[in-house]
Image (cartoon, rainbow, N blue to C red):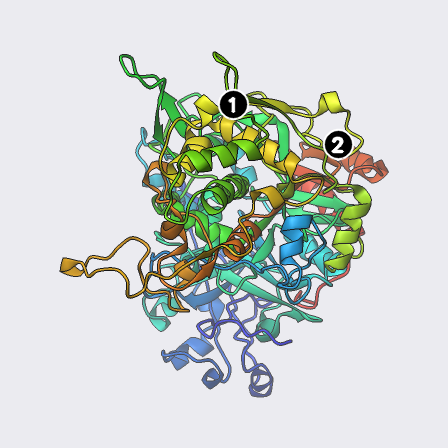
Amino acid sequence: MTLRPAADYIALAPLSGGNGTSLTASRAASHTLAYLLRRRVLYVVLFGSALLSLFVILRGALHEIDMDIDLDEDLLDIDLMDLLPPNTFESLRTAYLPFRAPRTQVSHNVTLLPVRELSGECVEAYFSEGAPCGVSGGQPKLDFLWTWVNGSDPLEDQAKKAAQAAFGPTDPWRPAASGTQARMYRDHDELRHSLRSVLANFRGYAGRFFLLTADFPLPTTTPNLTQALPPGWRLGQIPQWLDIEARTAWVDGDVGLQVVHHAQVFQPYLGTNFNSLAIESQLGHVDAISDHFPLNPPRKERRPVHDVSHEPCQLLYPCGSPVTAYGVVIYLQSDLMVAPTRPNAKTQGEWRSMGESNYILSALLFFAPFSLLTALSVGERFGQRHRPYVVHEAKSVSRPLLAEAAAIWPTAFARSATHAFRETAGPGTPSDVNTMFLHAHMLVERAREALLWTWVVAHVGTLDDGWGDAEARQAWAELGGAWDVPEGGKREVEVRAGRRTTLERERVMTMLAQAGVPEGLGKTAYVFSSSDGYAYATLGTRGQQKWPAFTPDAPEDKLPSCRISFRQCFPGHSRASEVFKHIAFRELQCGDCIISALMRTSGPLGLSTFLPSPDRALGSLAGKLPSLPFGLSFPGAGSASPGDELTVVPHLPLVDKWENGAFALRDVMGATGERNVRRWTLSLLQRYRYVIATTPAIFERLQSPRQAASMLARVDRNKEAALLCINDDVVSGDAEVAKTFREWQDKHWGTRAKWEKS
């Protein structure tokens, strides 16, 4: 496989030596796509400012690169020493790829992406009976994405200082002045070893590697470069160990590597960005990446992972594929909860972005005195709830769900993209979103929403969204309730969760094997599946030590229990969509308990009680609706052309506040084209499949030379943990710590990839 990078690149990299020797014509011809940069960096600090000089030698057959510029022939023969002052010292180790930044921003129109669906031959049995079923076409290849920064890069430092100087002393988004922030950008060669590890242990699942890096404006101290390249070109940061001369075919076997820069994905892009939260908010814009991709990357074998905050995680033993027959694998901590309130001045670190994210996920309640209602809902999307902490390690990400999240909260994502630094001094209004927190919890909440909508609107309610006495009686009977009660009695149902076999170990292994993952789970364990209901129903505000267990060996008195009150949960609405909104968002405990009751009546496997009748169909209204004046149309009556992704991708309303959503059957499914309701809901449920997993892990820190050596020796002795995460908290002796850590990594992951320099 040959992977050609974008044609808008010119290679820009250092040459060894300092005598200014130019390339021979024969050698230049043999490297028609490798344009070599000879540069040394003058990095002199005077009164707090840095002087940076870059030198470029561009030589070769330029006709091989599709460029609309002509380079000055003089640029090809300038000697480095003619550009630098006499007191030049050895260049810092860094490298760049010049590239043409996009001339226009990508459209912000809503675009939904389909998920890889289960095979049509078994999807019905999968949801109704819990039968094994793999995705169409077999187990898909996964692309791997790393976000990376080299904080020792002089252009990075120069851009960061310039950005810091633009903030006022009271700006809530001003970066921290503390020198400890430097650790966020230090590089200990984690990235190189991380790529090596995935090649060694995930090659069978790997499609392509993507490296997302920073970029910088052309330095004004290098006039030859700024004169040669027209406006709009930038320097993209790349690891200095990457072989520039092989850039037209960065491949190792059948795995290709592609470098992408922030300017190519940010919407909007305001310049060099140093905010990992902002960078994560734009991951859905990485073109050509697979539907599911491990971020920084997945968990398997004794291998390193580059952490979201630019700190390494190490994989120690086998622990399963990040995407399986059970859907996206997510890692949540059930005993650490995030409140649904916006951060305040006392909120620190990542809890700011998590608090903001849980706020927009939630619906806040306020009590209204003098009102007949107990409470009125205000604010956001899925209901007010504490939600569990997303484990701080490599994550499996669904690109279709990232696109869906950005469609629901476009302003929040665009706003986060404009923040060059994480907020560090007081409350922003509002804060950055935490994309990985939103991704995980939107997945769980959309699965809950889809279950309740399927039962209330698609199964029980009438085709025209009606809800009357007959529908109320049917719903109550399916929940196990008695309609006729003694005088003065209450219509209530005591619900005890049923036992389920979805996650029995042998069954899981069979499901994975049939889905193309024969090695199974390794040290990973699956602890909750979306096929068994709603994961957060029992967590409350403080969380629980363990996720609820429904396996056959669970004692009856340990199974979760709850109560459904007809008066509270079904208070007289006449539309099925309003009943759905009430139990899904206003009265969360109603929706949670209803799911538990229906899971029990569905038996040990499958979702049979939730599903509409196989022959239930929604007829087309095309040609039956009267014309409206002024170009108006009826809701859901738009054309259903094959290219309309909002029509062909089953989904529920893309609204940031549930009150604004139109959840009636026709509003959701559309008015044109006859649709089988059951098949449509099966596609909807497929979109939000997930499984929560746990993997034995330890968390360590690099602090000092002596501590680092002791800690790494301890890691080598540990045979139980499958995942090791290491934070860079070094306050002194960084050079010695870096040497120790690099040597330790190289001992474990020493095989060089084909795209590395020899």
Indicate which disc, 1 or 2, sits on the residue closer to the N terminus.
1
User: Relative to the observer, which residue lies in front, 735 or 242?
Assistant: 242
> Which mark is on residue 706?
2
- Mark 1: which secondary structure? loop
Left or right: 438, with 127 as reference point: left
State the SS at label 2. Answer: helix
The relative height of residue 542 versus residue 699 in the rendered view (above or below) is above
- Find residue 357 and report its horizontal and vertical position in percent: 45, 35
Q: Amino acid at mark 1?
A: Asp
Crowding around mark 1 (Cα neighbors within 10 Å: few <14, some 14 to 19, many 20+) is few
Q: What is the total number of numbered labels drawn onto the structure image?
A: 2
Q: Amino acid at mark 2?
A: Arg
Find residue 215 and report its horizontal and vertical position in percent.
Answer: 45, 57
Pointer 1 residue: 484
Kindly indicate whether the residue at mark 2 contacts the one at mark 1 (C-beta within 8 angstroms). no
Say above or below: 387 vs 199.
Answer: above
- Residue 554: name its quadrant: top right
The residue located at (58%, 29%) in the rendering is 537
Q: CA distance from mark 1 to mark 2?
A: 75 Å
Mark 2 crowd level (few <14, some 14–19, many ≥20, 10 Å Cα): few
Residue under the image location 45 percent in, 43 percent down: 457
The answer to whether residue 214 shows anywhere in this view is no
Nearer to us in this view, 624 or 702: 624
On residue 273, the disc is none
Q: Residue at horizontal 66%, vertical 53%? A: 126
- Closer to viewer: mark 1 or mark 2: 1
The quarter of the picture where the C terminus appears is bottom right
Residue 411 in sight from this viewpoint? yes
The answer to which image quadrant residue 207 occupies is: bottom right
In which quadrant is the N terminus drawn? bottom right
Rendered view: 46 above or below 473: below
Residue displayed at 45% across by 78% down: 76
